[in-house]
Image (cartoon, rainbow, N blue to C red):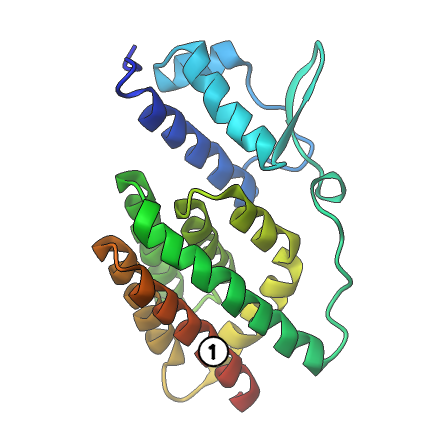
Amino acid sequence: MNDAPDSTERRSDQIYRQLAGDIEAGRLARGAKLPSETALAAEYGVSRPTVREALARLREEGMITSRRGSGAYVQEVSERITRIAPLASIQDLRMCFKFRIGLESEAARLAAQNHTDDDLRWLEAEIAAMDSANAKGETGMEQDFRFHMAVARASQNRFFVAGLEQVRPHIAQGMTINRTLSLMAETPRLVKVQDEHRRVLDAIRKGNGDAAADAMATHLGNALTRLFEG
């Protein structure tokens, strides 16, 4: 099993990211039971302690819960977050974007400082997924959200992940409107959006925290402008 002491953290991080991605994408449904530690260890070719580290991180972030004698389950949304009132006005939408600018700019700064090679691969994969959605004429909202979550995870601070998860329905609402308007625009605005995402990724890859924070703030500020221009 490839989980010697110098590689345990890397392998457990990979398992964490795979399971987190499956949960975020809905491949592991809310309330679904996860495979046993033994089954996961066999699937990933690692020992149970390595799997246990990955599950512990998911549990700390409120993505799964353990039931004695039964195993681990994906948390129901109502159990995972403290509900925030839905967006009820244009002003709410503006405030949500301003909240995101503050939160996600700092997450991007820390991602530039703390990211791993796996984080970069994850971010690149989400960029590619958005490219594919754009080519198919799809909104790409889920792929867009996963990119922002990947930035939060790359910060290595679980509270940024939890913060985005709390306002996921609000973010999804803004993203869906914005990306739908972009699909309808005469000028392909989604190309500009992708360029902004790539600038965030490039700054993170280079380890430039200030540039990453600025790129994220610019992207979200532009998204707010595009929304109301649309």
Q: Which of the 4 image quarters holds residue 129?
A: bottom left
Q: Tell me: 6 left or right of 176.
A: left
Relative to 114, is 206 above or below? below
The residue shown at (39%, 46%) is: 154
Q: Position of residue 108 (x, y in %)?
A: 39, 58
- Label 1, on which residue? 221
Task: Give the vertical position of 130 relative to 27 (above or below).
Answer: below
Which residue lies most toward the left here?
Answer: 206
* Residue 88 in the image, given as x and y percentages of width and height: 77, 74
Judge whether residue 86 can be spotted in this image: yes
Rendered residue at 59%/68% (across/down): 99
Three-letter amino acid code at the position of disc 1: Gly
Q: What's the residue at 54%, 82% (across, down)?
A: 227
47 on left or right of 174: left
- Picture quarter containing residue 137? bottom left
Measuring from the top left, give residue 102's x and y in whole percent. 52, 66
Residue 125 seen in the figure: no
